[in-house]
Image: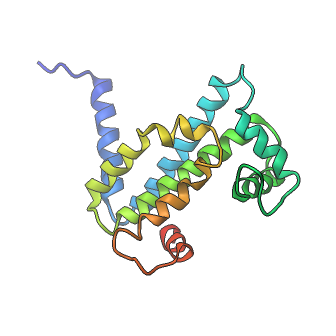
Amino acid sequence: MSAMTDAGRRGLRVVERLLDALTDPARRERTAAMLLLAYVALWTLYGVLAKASQDIHVDMAEQFVLSRELAWGYPKHPPLAMLIVRAWFAVFPTTDWAYYLLAMANAGLALWIAWRLSARYLDGERRVIGLALLTLVPFFNFHALKFNSNSVLMPLWAATTRSPCGDTHASTASMFNAAIN
């Protein structure tokens, strides 16, 4: 007699199909992109719901204010975060949900770069495990909801991992380009 219910079997089949899609060379990039979009959407929704009774983080408010008057640098931070915030809110409305979406899109981009770079060193199943484990790291979810001068660098950190892994003569721009293409 099997202890697994029909719902459990269906859930297991869904996971198996997902793993098949993530390890199939013809479908894995599209599947990973769709999963990361869902990851971004779910964590954005979590941020909106969990922080609805709070104001946005002080660092996020500071970046928004500083982004209104762009400069080459600021007393506490370099200008990259403010440039990104300004560009983002030129497209999206000035709301909390849009800021949380920016924060999680940044984390999603870092995870996408890690996924792409892992193809050079890992087979299909290990790539899936690597990405799954990265999504469990609080820096890519709970901490990423606070878009600040540290989290803005996540995609660049992911791209620069290529350098110690074998391409020591590449510039950061070429590493970032290779990571997203």
Residue name at image x 22 percent, y 22 percent: 4
**Does residue 77 lie above or below 133 as drawn?**
below
**Does residue 104 lie above or below 116 as drawn?**
above
- In the image, taking residue 138 as reference, residue 10 lies left or right, namely left
Residue name at image x 54 percent, y 50 percent: 108
Q: Tell me, what colour scheme is on the image?
A: rainbow
- In the image, taking residue 19 as reference, residue 4 lies left or right, namely left
Place of residue 21 in the rendered image (x, y in percent of width and height, measured from the top left): 35, 54
Which residue is farthest front?
A: 75
Place of residue 134 in the rendered image (x, y in percent of width and height, measured from the top left): 40, 46
**Does residue 156 lie above or below 152 as drawn?**
below
Place of residue 140 in the rendered image (x, y in percent of width and height, measured from the top left): 50, 43
Asked whether 54 or 74 is in front, the reply is 74
Asked whether 84 or 25 is in front, the reply is 84
Residue name at image x 57 percent, y 41 percent: 144
- The part of the image, by quadrant, that contains residue 24 is bottom left
Which residue is farthest right?
A: 69
Place of residue 37 in the rendered image (x, y in percent of width and height, measured from the top left): 55, 48
Q: Quadrant of the N terminus?
A: top left
Residue name at image x 33 percent, y 40 percent: 15
Which residue is farthest left?
A: 1
Q: How many marks?
A: 0
- In the image, taking residue 8 as reference, residue 42 lies left or right, namely right
